Image (cartoon, rainbow, N blue to C red):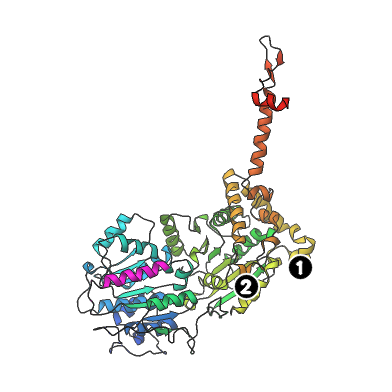
């Protein structure tokens, strides 16, 4: 129903988008990239990048894109979508009768939702095109001066990766931006483009590109490829507007694929992903987080088998919370007496939307290049970004939708690799697991929290311990909680970071979708325990109001003291005499007389 009857082909144009006769039909049993239609030079390049055999999405999409057809592809995150569309585009540009020139401007444009993803796609394009030096890749994504981007566009970029806002800006305001001969348009992470509110901007971009195409060579039409991890009504609407009689990839045999999380569709999970959840009381959250991270970085894995170095991504709900937990993890690692967390603070990174573009780019490259590291981040890193060799995902704050859960865990177990994910839930949030299972998240199992604490906590029943408060008397918890309070109170700066994180966390908890508020109920939060989890030994009402009441009380006290000092005057002889009464004003006399 998503595809049939919704896309009507345009009238045929000379040399337009019909299938090319020299393209082999789809080979579902393709064992290498040559079997899907790529020439040997690109096959060798992909081998050098570590791609030995095509994934499912690559086996299906590459021949269709090489045939010149529009393509609508749905595939789970981490399945190799970037190579699936860049490799055929690189081959078609390489095989043109006339060699590509910078003066032709943009011949291929890839639109992505975030700056980091734009940078990542640009990197892949650069590696694919390194042997074809005459084809110039580039990126415009904001975060730097427009004049620099304008200069690069003036020189000419043939394969351009960009974010929607910056591309629209240059299309409207940069006359030197040459794109009238555009041949390939890719909308990557289309569901994220829609979810982030870029649908209107993308529609404007397509209209402007159509208008500019009238000025260029019309001997062949523009080919459009749209890729998405999920399909919902917004993606369908964008597909109808941008695609021309597309071929579908990754849909069920009946053509279904619409609905996403809203429609109750089951998501596809990476095959080698192990999933777990933990029911953690509020006060225990920072302690269990630290213990879990320590376990990820332990020198030996399960069963005593040697374990490779770990790369851990921790997702939290807001920017201020990233700042706080990044600082706490670094400080706890420095205070670690038994060395269970073998983490170099220089290998602890943070990533969120409030960082400058220069900082975000540096973090991205540093984390990618590290063999063993930890990244604390918001959902800015949840979609599309391919961090190599991520071994563990920790969702410290649960996502609002099952779809977001899928994209978070998709940072690990990519392209056949193994990975683990852990989801933190409060005990009253247990029904969220059933929501995930209802969307096809199978195989998610509970890890008892007591296994991270002392021997007594491991022996006793967790629910009973929670009722009698014995968990809070556990020696491991007491020691770690004291450290968190000491670290937070060690400086005014850290205390300020903790207060900001607390306030932002509470606002984020209120912002869960209406469909989830019965599970993530703000009324069920113990605000005092939440404050404890941020190392704050203060009244939540004062923290939540930026100490307004406390500040007013302090000013009122100081004012009263200053008035008391003014009641007496120092006489010339050293004795005190009563201060002169202020003269009554006219309005005082009037009211008193009445």
Q: Which residues are magenta?
A: 200-221
State which quadrant residue 115 falls in. Answer: bottom left
Residue for point 60% across, 53% down: 503
Say the numbered circle drawn on residue 359.
none
Asked if 390 appears above or below 584 in the picture, the reply is: below
Q: Secondary structure at mark 2?
A: strand
Q: Which residue is mark 1?
A: 463
Question: Which class describes the residues within 10 Å of circle 1: few (<14), some (14-19), or many (20+)?
Answer: few
Q: Secondary structure at mark 1?
A: helix
Question: Which class describes the residues within 10 Å of circle 2: few (<14), some (14-19), or many (20+)?
Answer: some
Q: Earlier in the sequence, mark 1 or mark 2?
A: 2
Q: Is residue 314 left or right of residue 130?
A: right
Q: Out of 449 and 208, give the one closest to the viewer.
A: 208
Say the numbered circle drawn on residue 276.
2
For the stretch drawn in magenta, the main secondary structure is helix
Q: Is residue 385 left or right of residue 341?
A: left
Indicate yes or no whether the magenta region holds residue 14: no
Q: Out of 335 and 378, give the one closest to the viewer.
A: 378
Q: Where is residue 84 shown, x and y percent of the image?
A: 39, 78
State which quadrant residue 427 falls in. Answer: bottom right
Q: Is residue 117 visible?
A: yes
Asked if 198 appears above or below 477 in the picture, the reply is: below
State which quadrant residue 12 falls in. Answer: bottom left
Q: Out of 289 and 338, give the one closest to the viewer.
A: 289
The residue at the far left in this view is 98
The residue at the far top in this view is 573
Q: Is residue 111 visible?
A: no
The residue at the far front in this view is 594
């Amino acid at each position: 129903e998503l595809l049939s009857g919704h896309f009507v082909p345009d009238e045929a144009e000379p040399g337009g988008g019909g299938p090319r006769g020299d393209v082999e039909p789809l080979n579902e049993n393709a064992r290498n990239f040559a079997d899907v239609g790529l020439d040997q030079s690109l096959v060798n390049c992909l081998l050098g990048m570590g791609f030995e055999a095509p994934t499912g999405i690559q086996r299906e999409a590459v021949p269709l894109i090489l045939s010149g057809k529009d393509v609508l592809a749905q595939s789970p995150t981490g399945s190799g979508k970037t190579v699936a569309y860049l490799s055929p585009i690189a081959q078609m540009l390489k095989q043109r009768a006339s060699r590509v020139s910078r003066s032709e401007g943009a011949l291929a444009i890839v639109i992505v939702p975030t700056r980091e993803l734009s940078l990542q796609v640009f990197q892949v394009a650069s590696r694919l095109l390194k042997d074809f030096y005459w084809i110039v890749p580039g990126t415009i994504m904001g975060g730097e001066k427009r004049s620099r981007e304008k200069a690069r566009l003036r020189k000419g970029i043939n394969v351009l990766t960009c974010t929607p806002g910056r591309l629209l800006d240059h299309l409207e305001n940069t006359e030197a931006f040459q794109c009238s001969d555009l041949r390939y348009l890719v909308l990557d992470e289309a569901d994220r483009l829609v979810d982030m509110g870029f649908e209107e901007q993308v529609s404007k971009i397509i209209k402007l590109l159509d208008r500019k195409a009238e000025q260029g060579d019309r001997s062949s039409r523009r080919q459009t490829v749209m890729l998405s991890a999920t399909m919902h009504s917004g993606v369908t609407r964008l597909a109808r507007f941008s695609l021309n009689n597309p071929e579908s990839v990754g849909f069920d045999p009946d053509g279904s694929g619409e609905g996403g999380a809203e429609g109750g569709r089951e998501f596809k999970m990476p095959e080698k992903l192990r999933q777990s959840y933990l029911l953690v009381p509020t006060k225990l959250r920072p302690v269990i987080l630290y213990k879990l991270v320590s376990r990820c970085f332990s020198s030996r894995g399960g069963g005593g088998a040697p374990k490779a170095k770990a790369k851990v991504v921790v997702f939290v709900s807001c920017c201020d919370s990233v700042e706080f937990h990044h600082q706490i993890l670094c400080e706890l690692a420095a205070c670690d007496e038994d060395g269970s967390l073998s983490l170099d603070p220089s290998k602890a990174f943070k990533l969120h939307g409030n960082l400058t573009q220069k900082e975000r780019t540096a973090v991205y490259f540093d984390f990618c290049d590290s063999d063993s590291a930890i990244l604390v981040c918001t959902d800015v890193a949840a979609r599309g970004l391919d961090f190599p060799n991520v071994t563990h995902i920790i969702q410290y704050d649960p996502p609002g939708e099952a779809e977001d859960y899928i994209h978070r865990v998709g940072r690990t177990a990519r392209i056949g690799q193994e990975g683990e994910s852990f989801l933190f839930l409060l005990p009253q949030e247990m029904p969220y697991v059933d929501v995930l299972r209802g969307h096809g998240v199978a195989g998610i199992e509970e890890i008892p929290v007591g296994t991270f604490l002392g021997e007594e906590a491991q022996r006793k029943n967790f629910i009973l311990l929670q009722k009698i408060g014995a968990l809070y008397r556990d020696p491991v918890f007491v020691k770690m909680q004291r450290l968190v309070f000491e670290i937070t109170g060690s400086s005014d700066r850290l205390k300020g970071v903790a207060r900001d994180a607390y306030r932002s966390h509470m606002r984020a908890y209120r912002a869960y979708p209406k469909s989830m508020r019965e599970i993530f109920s703000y009324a069920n939060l113990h605000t005092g325990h939440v404050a404890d989890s941020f190392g704050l030994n203060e009244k939540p009402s004062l923290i939540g109001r930026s100490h307004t009441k406390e500040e007013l009380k302090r000013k009122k006290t100081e004012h009263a003291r200053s008035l008391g000092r003014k009641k007496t005057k120092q006489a010339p002889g050293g004795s005190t005499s009563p201060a002169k009464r202020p003269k009554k004003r006219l309005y005082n006399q009037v009211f008193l007389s009445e």
